[in-house]
Amino acid sequence: MSDDDNSPISAREARRLFAGLKAAPALVLAVSGGPDSVALMWLAARWQRSLTRGPRLTVATVDHGLRREAAREAREVRRLASELGLPHRTLRWREAKPKTGLPAAAREARYRLLAQAARAVGASHVLTAHTRDDQAETLLMRLLRGSGLAGLSAMASLSERDGIVLARPLLDVTKAQLIATLKRARIGFADDPTNRDTAFTRPRLRALLPLLAAEGGDIRNLARLATRLARANAAVEVLADGAERFLRLRDSDVAPQAGVRSFEASRFAVLPEEVRLRLLLRAINVLGHEGPAELGKVETLLTALDQAIAAGPRAAANGRPALRQTLAGALISLAGGHIQITAAPARRRKRG
């Protein structure tokens, strides 16, 4: 991108942003009506027109039913999409709204609805307008929550969700550039007041960014840090892949069983701690039935496993496993020198 973080995006820069999506059959553009997503729609429409044969574009606006203005903003997006020659769909979140964790629930609903819309129109990708600003804010949020290396990698330019690829072509573009692009094109956009509502975490962190920038922690540097952490995370994932293959090949004395992950304990114990954590996380998330495991709880489990392995055979008594715990719907046990992970029995419902 241009070295000027406040300059409008040129047609040449836009072609570079969307170049990797040229072969897609169809794309869904997630457009809320705010400056970032309106700029995404305008840039994508201009890019598509420059192609002899490009992907079909469909604009989708999610109305969460949380603000009165949302329906009007969706109609405004529909109007602008029509002017650009693009079909538009309004997706409504009709389920009951939770009393706590509303932003996270709304985000889950948004992606679910967008994936459904993509499948309906034969699109392989959903494009969102996340920017470098969003990347920096996400890094800060996860840092304050004590996320591990994977979480601090923040957002990837491409990821998969519900069988649909999520693409973030504007991840290295600043919000200021997008606003400058819209102003030059004389295109209006909505102002969502929740983006300034300090009842939510992200707006509070957004207010801190100028102070951090004064100390050198500006958006560019924070986003660069997220990129470097993502690079390191990818390297550790390769190590975890190799460790998993090594354990599987060397664990020849235990016949593989469907629905079971087994590691020879002494070989598992000598692996780097981060690799062991990832192997446990992978197995628990595949075989468990209560959602993704929390990193902190897996760290506690690993400490217990290490202690049980170090204690040796004497840790087991009367033929019982040296360790037996459940986590995230998975059952983890240590017995006979092997760590075994399976699905845990379903919890019994308490009678009312």
Image (cartoon, rainbow, N blue to C red):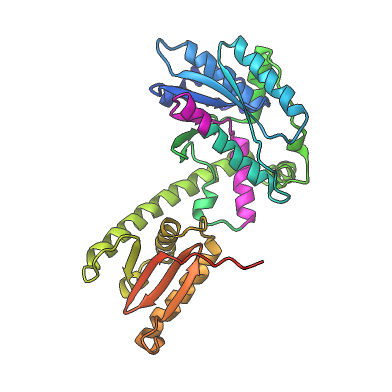
Residue at x-position 49% and y-position 52%:
150
User: Looking at the image, is 135 positioned above or below residue 22?
Assistant: below
Residue 277 spot, x, y in % from top left: 44, 63
Q: Main secondary structure of the magenta part?
A: helix
Residue 142 sits inside the magenta stretch = yes
Indicate left or right for 344 with 260 as reference: right
From which residue to which does the magenta span run? 116-145
User: Total marks drawn?
Assistant: 0
| In the foreground, 84 or 212 | 84
Residue at x-position 78% and y-position 46%:
199
Residue 257 spot, x, y in % from top left: 28, 63
Residue 177 shows in the view: no
Indicate left or right for 314 with 346 as reference: left
Residue 191 spot, x, y in % from top left: 75, 27
Residue 44 sits inside the magenta stretch = no
Residue 287 shows in the view: yes
Q: Quadrant of the C terminus?
A: bottom right
Residue 232 spot, x, y in % from top left: 44, 51
| In the foreground, 118 or 6 | 118
| In the foreground, 133 or 35 | 35
Residue at x-position 54% and y-position 50%:
152
